[in-house]
Image (cartoon, rainbow, N blue to C red):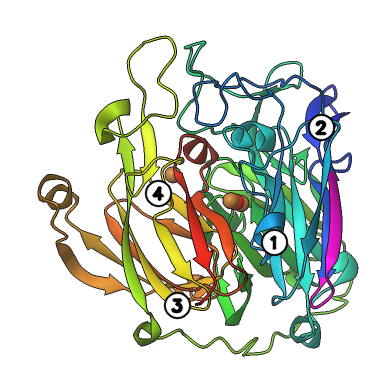
Amino acid sequence: MREIRVRVHRDLPPTRFWSYGGSVPGPTLEMRRGEPALIEWANELPEQHFLPIDHSLCGADRSVPDVRTVVHVHGARVPPESDGHPDEWFTSGHSVTYRYPNEQEAATLWYHDHAMGLERLNHYAGMFGMFLVRDETEAALKLPSGPFELPLVICDRLFDETGQLVYPDSGVPEAPWVSEVYGDVMLVNGTLFPYLEVEPRSYRLRVVNACNARFLYLALANGQKFQQIGSDQGLLAAPVELQRLTLGPAERADLILDFSALAGSQVVLKSQAFELMQFRVKAGATSERTALPARLHPLPRMSENVARRTRLLTINEYQDLPVVGKPTCSPRPDGGAPRMLMLLNAARWREPVTEKVTLGDIEIWTFANLTEDSHPIHLHLVRFQLLDRQQFDVDDYLTRGVLTRIGKPVPPAPEEAGWKDTVRADPGLLTRIIVHFSGYPGRYVWHCHLLEHAANEMMRPFEILAPS
Ligand code: C2O
Ligand code: CU
């Protein structure tokens, strides 16, 4: 992990970033299922941060060093000591060696910083990269590979006139935290407005939404359809044809794009009004079109009957710090108006673990979103399936503690029906997931992946207990 200066565009001076391995994104790490890997993560960052630290946030007070890092491979099934727990950060001049068993199906994973209270800044500074797990099932599909497989890490950023990153603040010097950060330009693989020359054939795109808070709505500017073949945790059961794909922060998509009808022309990949990148399709005959099999991968739906336990977990936003009447991590130091606090199940980060699960158990977790935002909820270690979403009466719940369901539960769309590790919990809805807690005993975390929310305690531990 090093500070670097690189150009994001030929018309801008070099931008300061914090990187893994000297590039933003960091190197794409390719793993083979069944072949474990050891990675030494070495922190050689400067001693001072260049983005506004909020020392009033939990875990970021002045008693700890300003520059702290810990890396988490998002979606990896790893023992707890290699998972990058937010409190297990280390400082410049130190390193850790983590072990990745890679005993999981082929998937589009990614790695990023996870230091408590700082992740939003370290990540914004450039500390993320892709981690691909490959296996035989995937290889047998003969998907476009080599130069025809493109990892795309997409994030939004704000820049000043000198081409430097800007991370907005609240204007309160002692409490600069803001509730979400949205950039006004998009970086694709660390570049502004990139283009790529492509052959008139099919390509495979491995996409990560690496925005701090922005949802992406991917589409081709010419309205052309594309196929989604995989989501967070690997292949879907069958290809899904889409014209637009919603991807929340930290969600991934494995896509097949066919340029064979576009020889000699160009097409833009966009998200709403944002131009992400341009594909310039070479003239000439179609070199190859990938005929996708009708079935990609057996993906049995998990049955609710096998769940040992159901938990109702609320997603909360409080305007007053002391509202929960619980020990505060750190009150606002300037004594000003209390700021927003964002919690899961009304519990603060440092409160005792409440989600204790026995290794091997299957549970249903129902997220009741009491806020007005969509929150992408991520569980470390595990993969899960989305059961359904259903409207409920938020006021009834807030005022009387009664859960009144409205209408019928809506099953997942086909592109959300695969194995997931991050799920969108939309406002006013109950989002139900079914989780198989397999892997390793120990302490992990679950959190909202809007990084500003996670930094303001929308993050909780969970513990996996060894079966007795
Ligand atoms: Cu993408 Cu807890 O992380
Ligand atoms: Cu959130």
Is 38 in the magenta?
yes
* Residue bearing mark 4: 374
Q: Quadrant of the N terminus?
A: top right
Q: CA distance from mark 4 to mark 1?
A: 22 Å
Name the side, left or right, on which 179 lies relative to 318.
Answer: right
Q: What's the distance in space between the residues labelled 2 and 3, CA to CA?
A: 48 Å
Q: Which residue is the site of mark 2? A: 9
Residue 310 visible in the picture: yes
Picture coordinates of residue 420 (x, y %)?
A: 54, 68
Q: In the rendered structure, which disc, 4 or 2, sits on the residue that comes first in sequence?
A: 2
N-terminal of the pair, mark 4 or mark 3, is 3
- How far is the residue under mark 2 from the one under mark 1? 27 Å
The residue under label 2 is which amino acid type?
His
Q: Residues within 10 Å of mark 4 (few under 14, many from 20)?
A: some
Task: Name the residue beneath numbered marker 3.
Answer: 362
Q: How many marks?
A: 4
Choose mark 4 or mark 3, whichever is in front. Answer: 3
Query: Cβ of disc 2 within 8 Å of ligand 1?
Result: no
